[in-house]
Amino acid sequence: MRKGIGVSPGVAVGRAYCVEEVFVNPQHTELAEHDVLSEWRKFEQACDETSAELRALQHKVTRQIGRDQTAIFQTQESVLRDPAFITKVRDEIFKRRRTAPLALEHVFKDYDQLRARTKDAFLKQRLLDVHDVIIRLSGHLSPLLSFEGDAAEVPHVLVARELLPWHIMAIGGLPLAGIVTQTGGRTSHAAILARRRGIPAVTAARDVLSQCVNGDLVVVDGRNGTVIVNPDPEQEGAYRKLQREFVDLRGKLAENRDRPARTADGVELSLLANINGVDDAQAASAMGARGVGLYRTEYLFLSHPAVPSEDEQLENYRQVIQAAPDHRVTIRTLDLGGDKTIPFLGHDREANPFMGWRSIRLSFEHPEFFLEQIRAVLRAAASPEGADAEIKLLFPMITTLEEIRRIRNMVRKAGKQLAAERKPYRFVPFGLMLEVPAAAFTIDSLLREVDFVSIGSNDLVQYLMAADRDNPKVSHLCEPLSPAVLRVLQRVIQACNRADKPVNLCGEMAGDPRSFLLLLGMGLRNFSMSPALIPTIKNLAAQVTLEQATECLRDVLAQRTTEQVRKLAGRRVTELAPNLELLDSTN
Ligand code: PEP
Ligand code: MG
């Protein structure tokens, strides 16, 4: 048994599908002689596609950002032509009869071991480039994973070291019963993917990959972070029963999709969805969201083979607006850096990525890029899809008033440019993401300059508590239900309500039953969360009156430790909505 962090509620039992950096379908076996050549051709084709992708990137980045930023692509492309690399893969395929992804995985491991051993800084950097290019290459070899034959019938638990944005694309709609990763915290990519799809998940399960192989039976308890590899028959039986109850409950809750979100005493709430793309916008509708409260546009950039142009962005925003419930979408501008990097925007490795050059700070440094994105949103708002839609622009990681003023000037400039070019556009409300403590303490003055506020509690908590959101070693500190966080949140929500400025919370805590109850007590009425969590929160809301939420908040604020807050709020949720116990986290 291993203990990690439960990041997506529910219980799953399934067969392990173990993946490391290079994704390999589990059913890959030794190649028959007559398949060897075609496998080699697949590899060659993937190399050609990767080269073409790197050249296209180089071309676009030179045009949009400058030649200085393109050296990395040339280096990566040279790896694809490196005879030593090619020979290694060739030997794996021809001599060891391995499929192309499996061959690549073996070569990847060899290089990674060498990188860990070497003390030579130059070689280390070169091996890091090899590492990056193999991951890119493997995306072309298995762009979308699928289970074939018998494997398609069996529920699987994905067991991975870490999930990168590219992996998330490759997983696509793969039917998964559960997810376990060795690293990551509550807001890592794996956690967000799992919550988005309503899959029970555990992160920070240390060494789990060394404890299990493909096909092992794995139990995932997303409520308290338990992972059991090869459970005994008694454990298996107990968890299978819980899994059935979980699936039943999920199905029942989804039936409330068309009901309005209201408290037991009739107060209207707005439950919105956090999305990463067009598919999620459709899922948001299916789960009964009232709109999209956060479109994380960086995924458009992370998943694009090169750099999306203004027109490509425009097309994407139009599709998202079309698919979103009630055509209501808050589009957040690029939030790169931290754990989300693309090589051409700041490929210098930051010593302290979350505290440094990320998010809006990075966008300011690339004004042409930033302006293109703003233009694409203003144009989408004037498109046929956008004409009657409720579109808003949201800017991440705002720290100072000067930043807001700078953004306002850029939005004006984008409008002027479009007018001069006779391109239709429409100004839309603009808001700030409240994620930095400095902004929380100056909220009164910031509010005068924006139309709305969206609280990014994932970042706000990490900055308030000085605890990296993705580092499992400090996850006990990176805790939304700590007295300090609750006090700051209450202050911000009250300030927004006093100023009559709409306020929403779009961090992961919006979909957590305990946090939801407290936020409701603070006066929050707009919540944005992973689509799969909406039915649960809607069900909880319908069983709570405002008075009960306020009372719970009052009692909680009298507690002095996180542990006490968690316990008390958890108890209240169970008393008010006993039917949801199976979904509430006991971490
Ligand atoms: C947040 O920080 O709470 C948020 C919603 O943004 P992200 O998780 O994308 O940083
Ligand atoms: Mg954030």
Image (cartoon, rainbow, N blue to C red):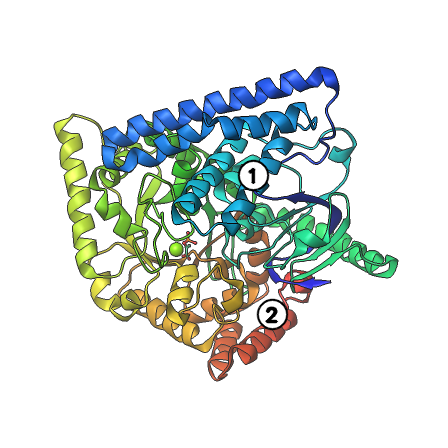
Q: Does residue 122 lie above or below 269 as drawn?
A: above
- Count of all numbered marks drawn on residues in the image: 2
Residue 462 percent across, percent down from the top left:
42, 65
Q: Residue furthest right?
A: 233
Is 94 located above or below residue 75 in the figure?
Answer: above
Query: Which numbered mark, 2 or 1, is in the foreground of this view?
Result: 1
In depth, the one of 78 and 475 nearer the eye is: 78
Query: Is 228 in front, or is 235?
Result: 228
The amino acid sitting under disc 1 is Phe
Instruction: Left or right? Give the position of 214 relative to 535.
Output: right
- Identify residue for label 2: 573
Distance in Å between CA atoms under marks 2 and 1: 47 Å
Compared across the picture, whether 479 is left or right of 355 comes to right
Cβ–Cβ below 8 Å for labels 2 and 1? no
Secondary element at tag 2: helix
Closest to the observer, 505 or 147? 147
Q: Ligand 2 is in which quadrant of the figure?
A: bottom left
SS for dot 1: helix
Task: Work out which quarter of the rendered image holds the N terminus and state it.
Answer: bottom right
User: Considering only order in the chain, which callout, 1 or 2, is on the residue closer to the N terminus?
Assistant: 1
Q: Which mark is residue 108?
A: 1
Measured as percent of width and height from the top left, residue 301 is found at: 38, 37
